[in-house]
Image: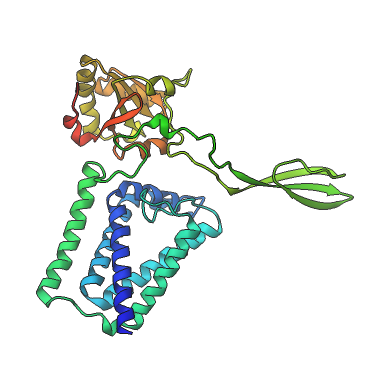
Amino acid sequence: MKVIVSLSRIFVGVLFIISGFIKLNDPLGFSYKLQEYFSVDVLNVPFLEPYALGISIFVVVFEVVLGVFLLIGYKPKFTIWSLLLMIVFFTFLTFYSAYFDKVKDCGCFGDALKLTPWESFTKDVVLLFFILILLYGLEHIKPIFRKLPTTILALMSFVVSLWFGYHVLMHLPVIDFRAYKIGNNIAEGMTIPENAPKPVLEYSWKFNVNGEENIIVTDGSYPTIDGEFISVETKVLDEGYTPPVVDFSIESEEEDLTEYFLSKDNVIVIVSYSLEKIENEGAKKLKVLSEIAIKKGYTVVGLTASGKEAKQYVNRTYGLNFDWYLCDEKALKTVVRSNPGILELDKGTVMQKVHWNDIEDLEFL
């Protein structure tokens, strides 16, 4: 039993640290996922959406700290019961999401590893099994160091986790797992290969046949039946190939300029998913940035999901001299975890990407 408990302890502790660290590397991304869970369409607790960032930081820090606590044997009873409560909650959440098909990606490992809700639910069930082993063999979980070093390590894990979370919020994720990371080409990320798997759909056709309701399931072809058509429902069995970059665009009110700007050299793209929520200190830096970039021969454009009035207000308030173009809000949140954030593109390739706190670090030709 002691060996099984030791192996379970290592497995659970390491997995919690890895999962927590990946989300701690991008707490804003995890907060967006929590907002999706809190929405009316999923858990229907929209009053929690404004607190999503705070909740995300608490959860991921607690996740990392519990993993460390388990490995070093700090307060084993508190640690095991906390792990059990956390995994029970997440198991319920992933089951609910999977069964009712509410959220396509659970966000358990951020953008580093995409899991479907059913895959995530299976992972949580496995973790629950090992945590129950730890609970049963609680007396075998002993500290690996003396009391003082163990306490110091426990405290350090908490302090370092908090510092790291604050650091990436004030700058950008240390490791960028998204399709818009430096070195990636956005245009190539939008391309679907010719031999890519196609979506597999199932169609349920409903007919009235001699006063009775008949349902015929096909792969898309209209069924041959002598009856009155009522309706058809479509179910996605396999989504097929999804390109890394989706819903990205650079559009004016008149035309789609995505291809045009992604083919140009030396383009500075200023991203603000919501101009109504733009950071005031960050917005103040944009005037100097854009003026320097234009003098250096760069094309400067803004990307936002906000409307015309918000664009005019921001340009007037902060004295900005570049145009804002339209892009999907969710896509912009994925592009850069900052509002505003800045990218340098060269024929669609991301050459530089910075948080507004680090605008001074941008290097111009």
| Res 203 seen here | yes
Q: Quarter of the image containing the C terminus?
A: top left
Determine the residue located farthest toward the left in the rendered image: 148
In the shown orientation, is residue 288 left or right of residue 216? left
- Compare residues 211 and 238 and report the one nearer the observer: 238
Residue 18 sits in quarter = bottom left
Q: Residue at x 28, y 33 (%)?
A: 340
Q: x, y percentage for residue 336?
A: 32, 37
Residue 57 in sight from this viewpoint: no
Residue 248 locus on image (x, y percent): 43, 32
21 sits to left or right of 189: left
Residue 89 found in image quarter? bottom left
* Residue sitting at the far right: 210
Q: Is residue 186 above or below residue 75?
A: above
The residue located at (32%, 55%) in the rendering is 55
Q: Nearer the viewer, residue 61 or 183?
A: 183
